Image (tube, rainbow, N blue to C red):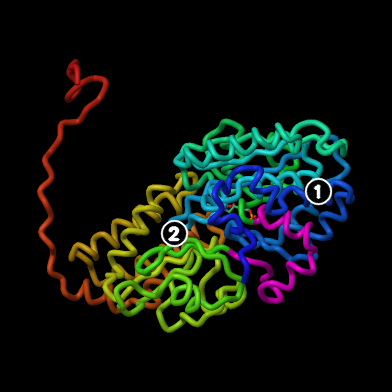
Amino acid sequence: MEPILLRARGEDKPRSISTHLRLGGYSAIAKALVMSPEDVIAEVKKAGVRGRGGAGFPAGVKWGFVPKDTSKPKYMICNADESEPGTFKDRELIHVAPHMVIEGIIISSYAIGANTAYIYIRGEFHREAEMLNQAIDEAYRKKYLGKNILKSGFDLDVIVHRGAGAYICGEETALIESIEGKRGQPRLKPPFPAVVGLFGCPTVVNNVETLSCVPHIIERGGEWFAGVGTERSTGPKLFCVSGHVEKPGVVEVPLGTTFREIIEVHCGGVRGGRKLKAFIPGGSSCPILPANLIDTKSDFESVAEAGSMLGSGGVIVMDETVDMVWALENLMRFYSHESCGQCTPCREGSDWALDIVRRINSGHGQPKDLETLERISRYASRGMTICPLGDAFCEPIASFLRHFRAEFEAKIAAGKPVPRRKQPILPVRSSQGLFGQEESV
Ligand SMILES: Cc1cc2nc3c(=O)[nH]c(=O)nc-3n(C[C@H](O)[C@H](O)[C@H](O)COP(=O)(O)O)c2cc1C
């Protein structure tokens, strides 16, 4: 497949507006702005493009939920938080095609009637925030942003809002709270942001990649887009492949390409000629799959049938040398650190799971530990928490135990406690000084 989203890769100055214009960029805006917003939404629905941020919800359907009969302002938010381990495709899009992202934001804002759009970008993406700001300045100078865009009467301002590096702020309602200046903690849904979102107004949140598909849909038609990929998972998809492959990186393929092709053809296969042990198909929160499922197709339905999720397309490849207990401990460390602490099952469960997996990994596991882990993974998921972060740490637990239970049992059975390093006992520091006495520290 000819690259669509990554077509500017390899260009001398991929981020400049002149490159974008030379490659046909910004022509979709001219096309969209003479269509009615309803027709733009209809075209995106026809394309069947599903959200690339993790949940796979159809973008056109989401846009259709925004109420028309309201005097409130509406907002468009581009989610560039990208904090899921194993996911780095949005960063690549910002590197090679920031104007494509902006063009998608302009068209989607027009479709839902928003005159202000935000790009919420994770705190660690300093350079990427700078790249976006430069591209936005260029777009203002060329009158693709601002007042009366291309003399259509449509106005749009785009603001880059930097987060502070919290995974939870990628969840759309926590992200909204964060833009509002509050602590980034998810809101209960319903109401959904499309009805009550930023500052209490109708808001659409879409992923960078989802929005980058939009100019191509308008330019080449919904039908063309629907013809790429499979019947229910349409379009091109970026997969970020990391871990034990020869050529890690971001690849663009039609949805439905097998993971074997992604790993072996596009990424040069498992590094050093070793055997594949397992892969996580959609970012660290998606269930792990064993090597024998490598021929699974990378569309939403096939991955679900195989027992996992397509998520954000972060393919983490593990070769035969990986110790699965260690790998799960690694993941639990991330989730227990990133739980926002609002819901007890997630706050306590993720810490508890980390303690147990760490204990097993260090040779102190107990026979009942696996049952306890399974109980935690049942009680903190499936709607027991306000947002899906509960599921995000439970799915790895359940799937690691489903496919690699024997490794956990073996570590428990070996029962050879690895001697713990002695930790120096540090004095407690407080404003009162050591043990309550005045002291400068
Ligand atoms: C804990 C958590 C983290 C998330 N992080 C991201 C993220 O970094 N980027 C993103 O686009 N979506 C993320 N999402 C999904 C968003 O809530 C939302 O579904 C998405 O931005 C909608 O865009 P889409 O429909 O285009 O996929 C996250 C969800 C959860 C529960």
Secondary element under disc 2, as helix, strand or loop, is loop
First in sequence: mark 2 or mark 1? 2
Q: Residues within 10 Å of mark 2 (few under 14, many from 20)?
A: many
Q: Please name the amino acid that badge 2 sits on.
A: Gly
Residue 62, relative to residue 378: is it above or below? above
Q: Position of residue 143 (x, y in %)?
A: 76, 34
The answer to whether the residue bearing label 2 lies less than 8 angstroms from the nearest atom of ligand 1 is no
Residue 313, relative to residue 113: is it above or below? below
Residue 40, relative to residue 292: is it above or below? above
Q: Nearer the viewer, residue 412 or 49?
A: 49
Mark 2 lies on residue: 86
Secondary element under disc 1, as helix, strand or loop, is helix
Q: Please name the amino acid that badge 1 sits on.
A: Ala
Q: Quadrant of residue 216?
A: bottom right
The residue at 40%/75% (across/down) is 269
The residue at 58%/42% (across/down) is 175
